[in-house]
């Protein structure tokens, strides 16, 4: 038993879709969420920057007494999870491996598609994660960079989104995949359009798989808090005009406790 | 005569479309460009953050000896130009007023449309700028937040972009505007699709107007450098995977001298 909160961070508010899934499985746990909205999106930033940002986010959460860290950001998980695992004392989990394990469970023809931001796909993190568990699957990655802005602007049912999705997903159709892994927090909101295009294959929402694995790990480490009230506290490094509306859509619940946070960034950087 | 370079800053590489226009009018001038790619987009950030970022960008350029500052970012111009004009010694120009003056010259029915990012439109900066010069025009603003990612992903001729543009521009058509001001660096790349939808009205590309006004102001202040070689030096606060390809598309020329820059940011921020 451990009454401390779980810490979750993401580059923005998209990770609240992960919080939504965690709450379904672990309704009593308190959660502190940090969205680095001042520096989003991470997907277009350099590896070096993402590692630095991820360290700062982790420190912020540890300073607030969390018992477990969840990286809800695919770009951060791709490049920073393994580094952070070596650097910090408390357990930390990312969004990549749980989805990979589920996809391997589901596939029959061993042809798995992965969609994500440009950085997630180009980093090769998914290929490496699949290879760790299985040597005989073919992984076909496809970057879908417009999906995030389309979701954030509420174009989740729009004909334009379908046209763009058809273009992004066409190579995956040709490759005859039987399982598609949604490798970005925002993508579950496009599942209807994606299913319309890709048809009756297996779909893996990594947030759901992460939540199940987190619950299992908390139980194993005797860190569960079954009598908690499930309070959600949200810190954002910047508050944009319409963040609350989008955040509540992702969380699927009203956003009550939210604060603007400052991170001590860039201090180690010198001149040019 | 003054051989010092002109300093141009933007939240990203979109401002290179402004540099392209400046070079047409002032081919001999050396230009130092700063793109704050580590913190883009500004359009979704808070006013407070944009002012802070704009101050840091200005300092960076002044430290490199520029004789004139051009704010190529609409969000920065909207909220920070007037503040910076009071704080710095050298002349500074933004992308809003030159386009406003041109639109007022062109309109006959006094109904002018302005398109831009969410922050540019919601800031009311354009309404204020129009009111400064004319009291009897109706200004209809329309945020087009998906245009920037669509341009950056190269969807400038795509059917999906046209569908989204039709949705964004429909209220402007209904309002019977006779002049449309493109209030974002990226939008001139969508002019073909915009013209297809809006038909034979007047179009104002603020970058072109800014360049003409800059040339006039340099001449008036005796700051021209007619014998210069027109060197372009580009500093970016982050280098993403495909920035060079996009940057060269915006600049319309090969990118030769580019460097990664660090800004001394967030030092004044305390804890939470």
Image (cartoon, coloured by chain):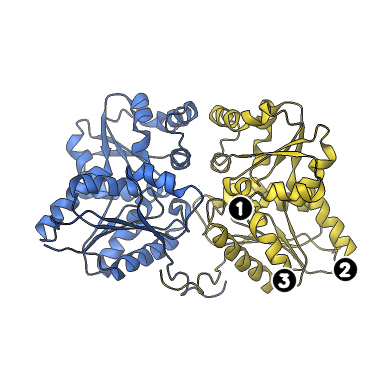
Chain colours: A yellow, B blue
Q: Which mark is residue A88?
A: 3
Q: Is residue B167 left or right of residue B111?
A: right
Q: CA distance from mark 2 to mark 1?
A: 29 Å
Q: Is residue A239 left or right of residue B229?
A: right
Pointer 3 indicates a residue of which chain? A
Q: Residues within 10 Å of mark 1 (few under 14, many from 20)?
A: many
Q: Which residue is mark 1?
A: A13
Helix, strand or loop at mark 2: loop
Q: Nearer the viewer, residue B244 or A50?
A: B244
Residue B236 seen from this side: yes
Residue B184 seen from this side: no
Q: Residues within 10 Å of mark 3 (few under 14, many from 20)?
A: some
Residue B29 position within the rendered picture, expressed as x and y whole percent measured from the top left: 20, 55
Q: CA distance from mark 3 to mark 1?
A: 24 Å
Q: Report the number of numbered marks.
A: 3
Q: Which residue is mark 2?
A: A1
């Amino acid at each position: 038993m451990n009454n401390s909160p779980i810490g979750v961070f993401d580059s923005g508010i998209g990770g609240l879709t992960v919080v939504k899934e965690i709450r379904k499985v672990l309704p009593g746990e308190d959660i502190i969420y940090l969205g680095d909205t001042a520096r989003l999106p991470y997907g277009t930033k350099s590896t070096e920057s993402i590692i630095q940002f991820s360290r700062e986010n982790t420190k912020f959460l540890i300073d607030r007494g969390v018992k477990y860290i969840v990286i809800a950001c695919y770009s951060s998980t791709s490049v920073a999870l393994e580094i952070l695992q070596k650097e910090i004392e408390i357990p930390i989990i990312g969004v990549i491996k749980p989805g990979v394990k589920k996809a391997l469970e589901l596939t029959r023809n061993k042809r798995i598609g992965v969609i994500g931001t440009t950085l997630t796909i180009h980093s090769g993190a998914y290929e490496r994660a699949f290879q760790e568990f299985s040597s005989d699957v073919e992984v076909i990655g496809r970057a879908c960079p417009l999906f995030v802005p389309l979701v954030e602007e509420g174009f989740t049912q729009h004909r334009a989104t379908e046209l763009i999705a058809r273009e992004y997903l066409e190579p995956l159709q040709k490759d005859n995949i039987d399982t598609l892994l949604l490798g970005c927090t925002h993508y579950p909101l496009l599942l209807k359009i994606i299913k319309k295009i890709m048809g009756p294959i297996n779909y893996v929402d990594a947030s759901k798989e992460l939540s199940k694995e987190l619950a299992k790990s908390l139980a194993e480490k005797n860190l569960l808090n079954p009598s908690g009230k499930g309070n959600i506290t949200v810190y954002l490094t910047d508050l944009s005009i319409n963040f609350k509306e989008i955040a509540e859509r992702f969380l699927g619940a009203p956003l009550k406790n939210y604060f603007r946070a400052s991170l001590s960034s860039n201090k180690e950087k010198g001149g040019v």
